[in-house]
Amino acid sequence: MAHIGIAGLGRMGSAMALRLLEQGHTLTVWNRSPGRTVPVVEAGAGLAASPAELVRRSEIVITILTDAAAIEAVYGGPQGILAGGLEGKLVIEMSTVRPETAKALASRIEAAGGLALECPVGGSTGPARQGRLIGLAGGSEAAFARARPVLEGLCRRLEHCGPVGAGSSMKLAINLPLMLYYQALAEAMTLCGHLGRDPAWLIDLFGDTTGGSNVLKARGGSIAKALGGDFSDATGVDLDLLRKDMRTMLEEARALGAQLPITEATLGIYDRASAAGWGGRDGAAVPAYWPSVAAGS
């Protein structure tokens, strides 16, 4: 078992931290909003006063942060991760960011004497707690080999996608169809909602046809509840985070000289949903938004 430090205790970071504790690792945590550390500390984790202290108390450091700006805030500065003494330590960066952000950060980690691996993950808080994420690693063979025992405790499937940057490219790619599917499902519901059938029946039927998706197996119940007007299920990944990821996809496509027209159109609809107060709702609730517009509610 390893002594691991985690910086970033949002929903995903907290779920992974609790999973690592259950796996028997010694854990130290830090978060910019101290209140979020309480449940993980109560479960047995130690608390660092700064990212630099987190590094000093850990063999392996994991970060899972919102975006490039958050990465700079946590890694930079006199009390940042890069100032903590990274010589010989492994840093696993798990945020969903553009490949160029992952590459630039890895260079800084290695210049400070550390070993860098990116490993964004597919999945939400439920799979994170169960160790059933999809890990998309990018980095050297040495970094991947060292990280593997820890990441296998979090992931049901762990892939070494290539050098740093490859993991981020794959994460953006695998997330894109899901975000578009939510809107496609919403439009499909608009065509059959007037039949008055039970949403659970509709989702079960869709899941048994070519109009289904893997997400219906995992989140079909939550989707059906939202279509019925019940948004009480716990939030895993909310709409505003989906919107952030879609903006990142569009930025990356432009950098590659490409366009993502369906993604751009869908983001516009999700922006409209967020403005209508849906931003904090779980992604599984998104298919209920467009039918509500069609119904004038």
Image (cartoon, rainbow, N blue to C red):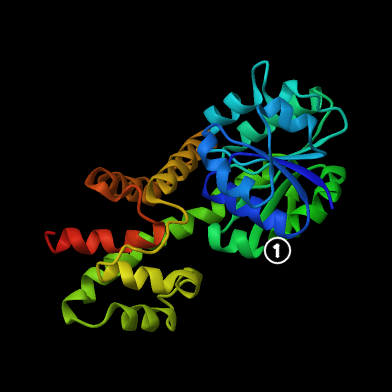
Q: In this view, does 134 lie to the left or right of 68?
A: right
Residue drawn where x is 61% and y is 45% of the image: 169
Query: Is 272 or 211 nearer to us in this picture?
Result: 272
- The extreme front residue here reads 42
Q: Tag 1: residue type? A: Arg
User: Residue 277, percent across and down?
Assistant: 25, 47
- Place of residue 214 in the rendered image (x, y in percent of width and height, measured from the top left): 51, 71
Q: Which residue is drawn at 59% across and 63% down?
A: 127
Residue 294 placement (x, y as % from top left): 16, 62
Q: Is residue 114 left or right of residue 170?
A: right
Q: Which residue corresponds to the image point at 67% horizontal and 23% vertical from the top-left?
A: 80
Q: How many numbered markers are drawn? A: 1
Farthest residue, direction top = 78
Residue 232 in view, yes or no: yes
On the image, the x and y values in percent for residue 293 come to: 18, 58
Residue nearest the viewer, comparing 269 with 146: 146
Mark 1 surroundings within 10 Å by alpha-carbon count, few (fewer than 14), some (14 through 19), many (20 or more) = some
With 294 as the anchor, is 165 left or right in this view? right
- The answer to which image quadrant residue 102 occupies is top right
